[in-house]
Image (cartoon, rainbow, N blue to C red):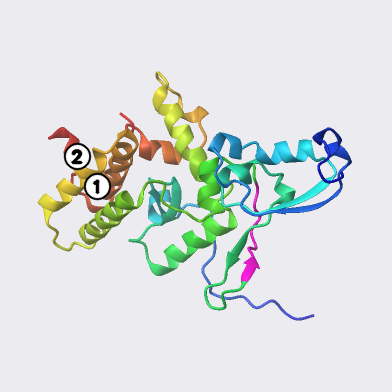
Amino acid sequence: MEKIKRTNAPDWLKPDEDYYSFDKYFEIDWPTGELIPNRDASEEDQERARITIRIYRLNNNGKPEDRLEELVQFEQMNSPDIDKFPYRFFIKRGQGQLL
Amino acid sequence: MERGGSLENAADVTGIILLDEIDLHLHPSWQRTILESVETLFPNIQFIVTSHSPFVVQSAKKECLIALEMEKDSGNIVVVDKNITSELSYSAIVREIFNIQFPFNREIEQKMDEFRQMANDLRDNKPIDEKKFEKLVYEIASKGVELEGIMRGELRNLEQRTGKSFDLWKK
């Protein structure tokens, strides 16, 4: 049986690990709601962000539109509880945007 | 159905019909229903249709959708290897299937490109024409509430990345 070779290729991100921070790896494209790699991050970190976006399909199946919709709903509520919303990372960065 | 026959027996008609650009000349509200209408009218006809309408795509059964595109180098028309679905908002269909990334018109897209270029220069600590930058932000933001919201988000991101303040609305 052929051995699987380990490579040093960039790996996808694991948001529950200590090193992870959304802003380190990603930024938001506000016109579309898509997540894009942080252009200030290292090439390797940008590649990790790209891999993560691709594997988890973060910009597919209407997720960007859904994020924008959740932000609109959040902004339209009186005293909304952010913990009851999906995409909290997105809402936190967009809060007050629609004022 | 014989030539000149009545549509009362449309259900008896069998065969395959090719319809090119089924959405042509139809109002968007009709584009949403045209597939259902022809399928109801001719239940024993297999329709093979083409369309460039997100509303037609949205109204199709997802298992019936095939996305095609032209290869840049060869000019060949090929099936796009995408897990496409019609169960999306029309804005998501435009973005994901028709690959139109920017949701506003070309003029605004060009201004946004200009804004992004200046924002990138700021992030790289390169000098920019601040008056021009400010004017550009106002110009985009003043076009409507959606764009005003987008510019708030863009400026907030820029503040976070550069440590500078760009709250132009406070002025």
| Amino acid at the residue labelled 1 | Glu
Decide: is A26 above or below B73: above
A30 falls in the magenta region: no
Q: Report whether residue B64 is seen.
A: yes
Q: Position of residue B83 (x, y in %)?
A: 66, 55
The numbered disc on residue B159 is 1
Work out whether mark 1 precedes mark 2 in sequence or the reverse, and give the earlier one.
1
Q: Is residue A68 above or below residue A78?
A: below
Q: Are marks 1 and 2 in contact (CB under 8 Å)?
A: yes
Q: Mark 2, chain letter? A: B
Q: Residues within 10 Å of mark 1 (few under 14, many from 20)?
A: some
Residue B129 position in % (x across, y down): 12, 57
Which residue is the site of mark 2? B167
Q: Residue furthest front?
A: B4
Position of the C terminus of chain A by quadrant = top left
Part of the protein shown in magenta: B77-85
Tag count: 2
The chain ID associated with circle 1 is: B
